[in-house]
Structure formats: structure tokens, C-alpha cells
Image: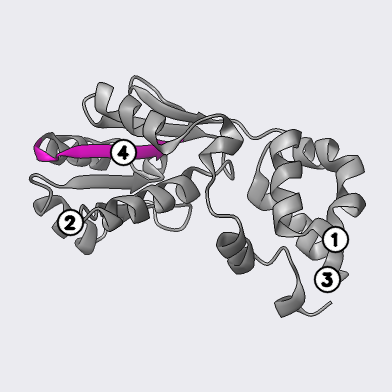
């Protein structure tokens, strides 16, 4: 199978699998009410590949549609410190909403810089693997049932092939949906 035809290609999955809070037993209204009750400050927690970044992307889009585009800082294994652009973002934070993806990658000093600057923000939402002392807005814990539902949406024709061992595959990837679907991609592509 060639890459552009693979139903588990990451770019295709992102288009096909818009974040659906009903799949985790919630709604946008419930999530927004929780965030408001927490003073518009909190974290979205979950293991790597659990959907934290996807959730924040969907939330940002929702806010943009309301005319409240959040400022964003994105961190990961390759980007483990604030860039000059990120520092500039922190100077524009007064009265704005800030989303920080992957805060756990930062050294403590830069986490402190974000916390200090965010005092003037209208709201702050951070993704992390663990909540720490911060209030949790949403905890994402993918399971085999969720993986099955996502697989049915992404590629119903391949669900029967992968579903009998989906729980073992998800366990092998430690609950990481991204790695699970990349493994399905590789298998369909005939890769080892």
C-alpha cells in the first residue's frame, strides 16, 4: 500500500478524527465550565499519545471561532526550551488566553517564567503527563474501547483486521494512540 492510500497516515487521521469529547464521556460545555470553575487555569493530563495536543488544537479552533484566538507555545522532545518567539508570546499575554503544549519538557526556570507571565493572562491551559499541583481540567486515559471507536471512524474496512488484538497492541504501546495507529500504518504498508 502506498503512503497516500494508508488510512492510518498521521495527516489523514488528524483530518478524519476531529476531537470528539463524547468519546471520553464529556462535552465542550462541561469542559469549559470546569475550566471556568478553576479560574481559567489548569492542565490537561495524559500519557504521551493520549490526545492532549489534539484536544488543545480543537479547543483553540473553537476559541478562534469565537474571536478569542489563544496564544500558543509548543514543546516536545526536540524543542525543550522557549524560543525567542515564545518569549515574545509571553510579553503579549496580558488579557489573552495561553495554551502551552508539553510543558513537562521545560527546565524549571522556564516553567517559572511561564507561570510568572501567565498571571496577567485571561486564561491558561497546559498539557502535561502528570498534573503535579495544578488543577486538572481534563484527564485523558485512552483504553481499547476508545481505540476501537477511533479505528472504526478512521478505517472501518480495517477494523476487523486489527480489533481482535487491539487491547494487546494498545498495552504494548502503553496507551499511546499515536504509536498504536503508526503501528497499524506500518503493518498496512508492509513495514517490519
Query: Which dot, 4 or 2, sits closer to the camera?
Result: 4
| Coordinates of residue 181 in the picture (x, y in percent) | 72, 54
Secondary element at image label 4: strand
The answer to which of marks 2 and 3 sits earlier in the sequence is 2
Q: Residues within 10 Å of mark 3 (few under 14, many from 20)?
A: some
Return the mark for residue 157: 1
Q: Is residue 91 above or below residue 190?
A: above
Q: Work out how far the residue at label 3 is from the one at label 1, CA to CA, in angstroms.
A: 15 Å
Labels 2 and 3 touching (C-beta < 8 A): no
Residue located 57% across and 61% down the image: 14
Where residue 53 sits: x, y (%)?
Answer: 46, 49
Which residues make up the magenta segment? 120-129
Q: Nearer the viewer, mark 4 or mark 1?
A: 1
For the residues marked 2 and 3, what is the alpha-carbon distance in whole angstroms?
Answer: 41 Å
- The answer to whether the residues at label 3 and label 1 have Cβ atoms under 8 Å apart is no
Q: Secondary structure at mark 3?
A: helix
Q: Residue at x 72, y 43 (%)?
A: 149
Q: Earlier in the sequence, mark 4 or mark 2?
A: 2
Examine the rendering and report whether any part of residue 164 can be seen: yes
Amino acid at each position: 500500500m502506498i503512503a497516500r492510500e494508508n488510512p492510518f497516515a498521521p495527516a489523514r487521521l488528524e483530518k478524519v478524527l476531529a476531537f470528539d469529547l463524547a468519546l471520553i464521556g464529556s462535552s465542550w460545555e462541561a469542559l469549559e465550565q470546569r475550566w471556568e470553575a478553576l479560574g481559567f487555569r489548569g492542565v490537561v493530563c495524559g500519557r504521551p499519545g493520549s490526545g492532549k495536543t489534539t484536544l488543545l488544537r480543537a479547543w483553540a479552533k473553537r476559541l478562534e471561532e469565537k474571536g478569542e484566538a489563544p496564544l500558543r507555545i509548543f514543546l516536545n522532545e526536540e524543542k525543550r526550551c522557549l524560543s525567542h518567539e515564545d518569549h515574545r508570546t509571553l510579553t503579549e499575554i496580558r488579557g489573552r488566553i495561553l495554551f502551552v503544549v508539553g510543558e513537562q519538557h521545560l527546565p524549571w526556570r522556564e516553567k517559572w517564567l511561564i507561570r510568572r507571565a501567565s498571571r496577567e493572562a485571561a486564561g491558561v491551559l497546559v498539557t502535561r503527563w502528570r498534573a503535579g499541583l495544578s488543577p486538572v481540567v481534563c484527564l485523558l486515559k485512552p483504553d481499547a474501547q476508545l481505540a476501537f471507536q477511533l479505528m472504526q471512524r478512521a478505517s472501518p474496512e480495517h477494523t476487523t483486521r486489527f480489533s481482535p488484538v487491539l487491547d494487546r497492541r494498545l498495552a504494548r504501546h502503553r496507551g499511546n494512540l499515536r504509536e498504536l495507529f503508526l503501528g497499524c500504518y506500518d503493518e498496512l504498508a508492509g513495514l517490519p
